[in-house]
Image (cartoon, helix red, strand yellow):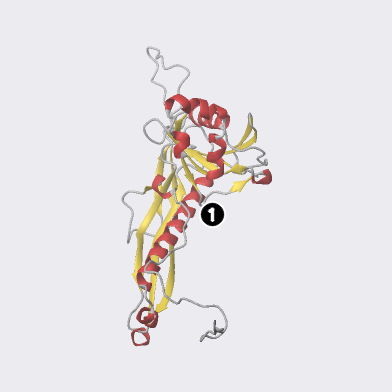
């Protein structure tokens, strides 16, 4: 049989395929949860000044006795009003690109940039809203599976040494309802927003498993804490909004809150804007998102009847 010697007609090196997929794959973004739990200040908008002042009505103290005595005037109580000013701020980011990139690229650069800018906008607003929630005066620090401490000066003075569980939920809800006289957020329920680690700590508690064994067997399968102790829970993986804190990052940070926790003063709703198309004879392009708004707590106190938020955190 004749002997053959095979040779290749291509240069040495790695063979490369330069074909592109028809789909443009995008990086995943974190989950945003805080903004839907804020409420806009009614009656405020464009051309109405650099800040808006909201008025708050304090409670009238319950008397020891309201029994009247004949011939004696009805006792008088104080009716106290207070205010807080919320100042919006300009927010925005942009991405430049060129007409050349549109002419040569297989993909629509403008559409892709707009999608990613909308996602960035959501993250920025979520962080701002989360910061307003976490600016509250009442802090709760888990220091054991059956121990925790409250700080009411706006600063957590203790390092967390345990993650969330059912015991901590019970303590916080009792504190909101009994000590702070805080009304539930909606439908008789408080709301808790927690980093994924905090939600996992609750779901790993045998007390949670026993609770849901008969009430909602699918909760574990779905990864949902559900409604418990008159509180419903939301989880997030947005690192800039809520972190993993405490000794050895043991605690998934979160907040539990009631009615009217944070408001939003909005001069201009978030929107996408196109840059000028006539610059450099149409070769330069840009897309930006822009907004003018601000978030703030309604009651930045730890007083009963006023405080609405408990921040679960660590020093």
Total count of labels: 1
The residue at 47%/26% (across/down) is 213
Q: Which residue is mark 1?
A: 240
The quadrant in which the N terminus is found is bottom right
Q: Is residue 49 above or below residue 85?
A: below
Q: Is residue 295 above or below residue 91?
A: above
The quadrant in which the C terminus is found is top right
Give the x, y percent position of residue 28: 46, 58
Furthest residue to the left? 43
Q: Picture quarter containing residue 247?
A: top right
Give the x, y percent position of residue 66: 42, 17
**Residue 89 visible somewhere in the drawing:** no
Give the x, y percent position of residue 227: 44, 32
Density class for disc 1 (Cα within 10 Å; few <14, some 14-19, many ≥20) is some
Horizontal arrangement in the rendering, residue 312 relative to residue 52 (left or right):
right
Furthest residue to the front? 1
**Residue 250 visible somewhere in the drawing:** yes
Give the x, y percent position of residue 278: 32, 83
Q: Nearer the viewer, residue 201 or 32?
A: 201
Q: Picture quarter containing residue 144?
A: top right
Furthest residue to the top? 70
Q: Is residue 189 above or below residue 14?
A: above
Q: Is residue 11 above or below residue 55?
A: below
Q: Nearer the viewer, residue 54 or 91?
A: 91
Say which element carries label 1. loop
């Amino acid at each position: 049989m004749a002997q053959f010697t095979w040779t290749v007609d291509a240069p040495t090196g790695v063979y490369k395929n330069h074909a592109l997929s028809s789909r443009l794959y995008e990086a995943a973004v974190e989950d945003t949860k805080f903004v839907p739990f804020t409420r806009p200040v009614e009656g405020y908008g464009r051309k109405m000044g650099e800040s808006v002042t909201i008025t708050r009505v304090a409670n009238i103290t319950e008397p020891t006795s309201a029994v009247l005595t004949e011939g004696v005037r009805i006792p008088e109580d104080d009716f106290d009003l207070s205010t807080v000013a919320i100042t919006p701020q300009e927010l925005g980011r942009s991405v430049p690109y060129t007409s050349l990139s549109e002419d040569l690229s297989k993909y629509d650069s403008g559409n892709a940039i707009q999608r990613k800018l909308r996602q960035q906008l959501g993250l920025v607003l979520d962080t701002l809203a989360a910061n307003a929630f976490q600016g509250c005066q009442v802090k709760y620090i888990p220091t054991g599976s059956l121990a925790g401490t409250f700080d009411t000066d706006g600063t957590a003075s203790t390092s967390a040494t345990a993650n969330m569980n059912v015991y901590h939920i019970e303590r916080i809800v009792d504190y909101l309802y009994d000590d702070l006289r805080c009304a539930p957020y909606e439908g008789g329920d408080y709301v808790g927003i927690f980093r994924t680690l905090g939600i996992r700590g609750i779901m790993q508690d045998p007390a949670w498993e026993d609770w849901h064994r008969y009430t909602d067997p699918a909760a574990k399968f779905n990864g949902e804490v559900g409604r418990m102790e008159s509180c419903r829970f939301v989880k997030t993986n947005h690192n800039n909004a809520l972190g993993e804190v405490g000794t050895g990052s043991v605690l998934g940070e979160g907040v539990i809150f009631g009615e009217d926790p944070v408001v939003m003063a909005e001069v201009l709703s978030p929107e996408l804007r196109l840059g000028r198309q006539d610059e450099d004879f149409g070769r330069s392009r840009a897309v930006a998102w822009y907004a003018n708004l601000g978030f703030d707590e309604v009651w930045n106190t730890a007083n009963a009847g006023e405080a609405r938020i408990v921040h679960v955190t660590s020093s």
